[in-house]
Image: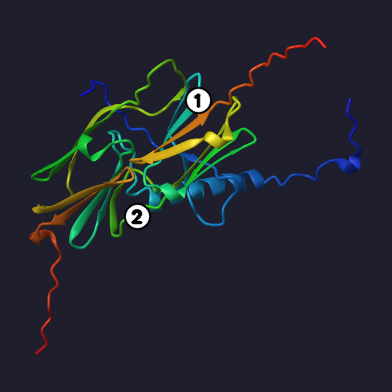
Amino acid sequence: MTSQEIKASPKTQAVAEQESTKNETYYSPMVDIFETPKAVTVIADIPGVRQEQVELSLDDNVLTIHATMSAERPAGRILLEEYEHGHYVRRFSVAESIDQDKIEASLTNGVLQVILPKLIPAQPKKITVKVG
Amino acid sequence: MPLIRFTERPPCRNPWAEFERIRRGMDELTKSCTEKGRFQQRANVFPALNIYEQSDQLVITAELPGISSEELDLSVEGDTLTIQGARAAVKQEGPCAYHRREIESGSFSRAINLPAKIDPHHLSARLVDGILTIILRKAAPATPKKIQILSA
């Protein structure tokens, strides 16, 4: 058991790209982003979202995580409500050049992991000059 | 110096507009306090819980991303439900530089007083996509009884 305790932190609301006609709430998921020499990894907490409802896109160096909440609110009278259901959206501008074909994403226990491999810069090729 | 012609000046502002804006703000504030805010509380202890009451059972939900069912421990003792667990930090081998670190790891423990008497033999819990749902059957005296009215 680790000595550190998890603190309660309220969810922060986010704004979807357009204002929607439906009264839906968007939250900004908590993320960890780290970079290794080979890749940039983004980890986001998106509880209640099924795998097929995660939309990831990398457009003009902007990574968008858009996840639609699928877990339904249970029926019944609310006795206590400490958190609200909602979708997730968050955008990041990625400074590094990313190899778009090799992006990998996985979802386990409500945690999304996106691995963005860096584009390996083309090695300078030495051209030998033949003597004609 | 910028020159503004007289005709280009913005029309005279409505002196009551500011009062109207304040009034609208106050309306919103009271609305959120009375309608929505009644059951809404900020959780001081992780995890935040929602409790729903149905006619014969209590449903408690919590968002626990990144925690597997093995790392979670639930127990009921009398009227107290205890949720304990730990979230392991993501292990990284090799050199890595963190740009953002918002996800917390560590242990947590929360005990809550259940709002109704429950039947300790009918409890179920499941953890799907990082959402924990606990279903507690209410004890017989706590379930509403329908009273038949006999007519002579």
Q: Residues within 10 Å of mark 1 (few under 14, many from 20)?
A: some
Q: Nearer the viewer, residue B131 or A122?
A: A122
Residue B55 position (above or below residue B38): below
Q: Residue furthest front?
A: A132
Q: Which residue is mark 1?
A: A39
In the displayed orientation, state which residue is furthest to the top. Answer: A131
Q: How many marks?
A: 2
Name the spot of residue A41 as percent of width and height, x first. Answer: 47, 28
Q: Mark 1 or mark 2: which comes first in sequence? A: 1
- Tell me which amino acid carries mark 2: Arg
Question: Residue A55: in sight, yes or no?
Answer: yes
- Residue located beneath label 2 in the image: A73
Residue at disc 2, secondary structure:
loop
- Marks 1,2: beta carbons within 8 A: no
Mark 1: amino acid: Ala
Q: Where is residue B39 shown, x and y percent of the image?
A: 32, 49
> Is A115 displayed left or right of B66 in the figure?
right
The residue under the point 52% across, 28% down is A117
In front of the other: B3 or B113: B113
Q: Quadrant of the C terminus of chain A?
A: top right
Residue at 8%, 61% (x, y): give it: B140
Marks 1 and 2, how far apart at CA: 37 Å
Residue at image location 47% in from the left, 36% down from the top? A104
